[in-house]
Image (tube, rainbow, N blue to C red):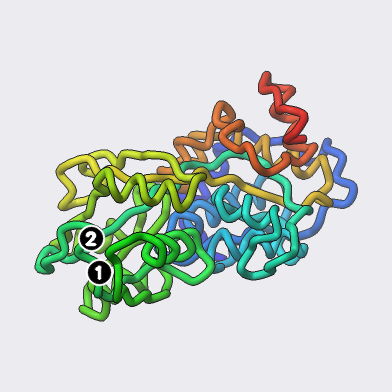
Amino acid sequence: MKFSTFAAMAVATVAALPATAQDREGWPDSITIGTGSQGGTYFGYGSGFGAMISENLDINAGAEITGGPVQNVTLVETGEHQLGFVTLGPADEARKGESPLMPGVPHENVRALFPMYQTPLQAAVLASTDIASFQDMAGKRVGVGPAGGTSATYWTRFFENADGYDGVVISNAGGSDTAGQLKDGLIDAFVYAAGLPTGAYAQLAVENDVRFISMDEETLAKMMEIVPAMAPFTIPANTYEDQPEDLQTVSLWNFAIAHQDMPESLAYAITALAMENNDRMVTNHAAAKETLAENVLKNQVIPFHPGAVKWFEENGYEIPDNLK
């Protein structure tokens, strides 16, 4: 994987960890990070963080394009990936054995490392369409992102369970591809879930006249009824071009996860790298402004890896016994 000269220079400014002095017993030579589709936040965030790991921990770390959280939690559970990014809704469901990829199999090997950021649900249409609300999407072709991702999982669930959305035709593709389908008239609306600003929406709004859709109270309430892990969220005005006002929506928190068998010293080092270098993390993606230790207890569903617990408790953040 190639990184820009700017990214390489930025990596050099990270507060270096004394990797050679650490207990490296059991550390792998390489790490695969399960992210998401191109055009989504996970891939940019993960590519940059992989560069930080490679530079500072002397491990070859690379970001892999996946279908998103639903797939990532299973890839970590089975040991195919060493790191992954998840939203807490799919992670909690997988822990309970409710993953659509491995139904009936509780994902008991997954452990949380550190908080990432919130993922708001978002929606956009071309300004030339007559779609002005979510209710107007009834009977329309709607792109929901890649199958297995947070977006596809929860938007599909919403359209299938909320009243008044008969005839919605779901389309699955990566974020950038879905934006292209909207631009080309292959779909009528693009609904998604990703950190702010989302690259696919940003590019779409620069190249086209776009209308962003805000949730009314009825839509907000129904989404939170269908997905109790959701919480109200406001997308600030001017996050994108053609978006002069705040948008009301809902969001889920994202956390980095690892397999419980990851060496404690490695989990500690990875957690420290993310938590102690926020300025560098923000250069990976602006959403990392929420990648802060103070958000650690936004996770109340995934047990933390002992290495992560060690770092947080050394730095004054008590982890409840039920999350250890």
Instruction: Name the residue located 46 percent from the left edge and 70 percent from the top edge.
Output: 146
Percent from the top left, x then y, of residue 264?
82, 41
Q: Which of the numbered marks, if any, corresponds to residue 138?
A: 1
Within-10-Å neighbours for mark 1: few <14, some 14–19, many 20+: some
Placement of the C terminus among the 4 image quadrants:
top right
Q: Which of 283/102 is in front?
A: 102
Percent from the top left, x then y, of residue 257?
67, 49
Instruction: Name the residue located 71 percent from the left edge and 27 percent from the top edge.
Output: 319
Within-10-Å neighbours for mark 2: few <14, some 14–19, many 20+: some
> Callout 2, which amino acid?
Gln
Q: Which of the numbered marks, if any, corresponds to residue 135?
A: 2
Give the quarter of the image for residue 125: bottom left
Q: Does 143 appear above or below 133?
A: below
Q: Which of 149/97 is in front?
A: 97
Q: Is residue 233 visible?
A: yes
Placement of the N terminus among the 4 image quadrants:
bottom right
Secondary structure beneath dot 1 equals loop
Percent from the top left, x then y, of residue 51?
59, 52
Q: Is residue 62 visible?
A: no
Q: Which of the numbered marks, if any, corresponds to residue 237?
A: none
> Callout 1, which amino acid?
Ala
Secondary structure beneath dot 2 equals helix
Q: Relative to 239, is 321 on the left or the right? A: right
Give the quarter of the image for residue 301: top right
| Label 1 close to label 2 by CB (< 8 Å) | yes
Instruction: Name the residue located 51 percent from the left edge and 39 percent from the top edge.
Output: 280
Give the quarter of the image for residue 28: bottom right
